[in-house]
Amino acid sequence: MTGITPYLHFDGTARAALEFYRDVFGGEIVLHTSAELGRDDGPADAVAHGMLQGPVELFASDTAPGEETTVLRGIQFATFVADGGVLDPLALKPWGDHDGQVRDRFGVTSLIGYQG
């Protein structure tokens, strides 16, 4: 794999988030639980490392007690994600393209847009 792949850390919802993104973008999920990787710093069925592999690549895990979850500020993903709140409705912008912003139920903000 070449390029930058986001790695998101969730408070117990990594499996649901990866399943959601798979349903939106397609691809395959690979999961490794804490028990499988020999971790004992959280629930045995917590996602210690998960991957969405396909048109969109993404890593995710559940945080152990005391670890920080992902908080995104000053960054957004330029993809379409459904099932969330509209932050900026899709509209023609002064530079001639259309774009808008949404935030999904896991708190990830995405820019959507098209030219023409």
Image (cartoon, grey):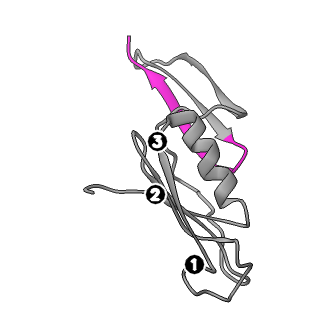
Q: Residue at x 46, y 18 (%)?
A: 94
Determine which residue is flagged by label 1.
36
Determine which residue is flagged by label 3.
27
On screen, residue 33 versus residue 16, left or right, reads: left
Q: Residue at x 62, y 47 (%)?
A: 19
For marks 3 and 2 on the same chain, the one whose residue lies earlier in the sequence: 2
Determine which residue is flagged by label 2.
6
Q: Is the N terminus in the top left, top right, bottom left or bottom right quadrant?
A: bottom left
Q: Residue at x 43, y 43 (%)?
A: 56
Q: Is the C terminus in the top left, top right, bottom left or bottom right quadrant?
A: top left
Closer to us: 74 or 8: 8
Q: Circle 2: is it few (<14), some (14-19), or many (20+) Cα within 10 Å?
A: few
Residue 51 placement (x, y as % from top left)? 48, 58
For marks 1 and 3 on the same chain, the one whose residue lies earlier in the sequence: 3
SS under mark 3: loop
Closer to us: 72 or 21: 21
First to last magenta residue range:
104-116
For discs 1 and 3, the disc positioned in front in the rendered view: 1
For discs 3 and 2, the disc positioned in front in the rendered view: 3
Q: Is residue 106 magenta?
A: yes
Quadrant of res 32: bottom right
Q: Amino acid at mark 2?
A: Pro
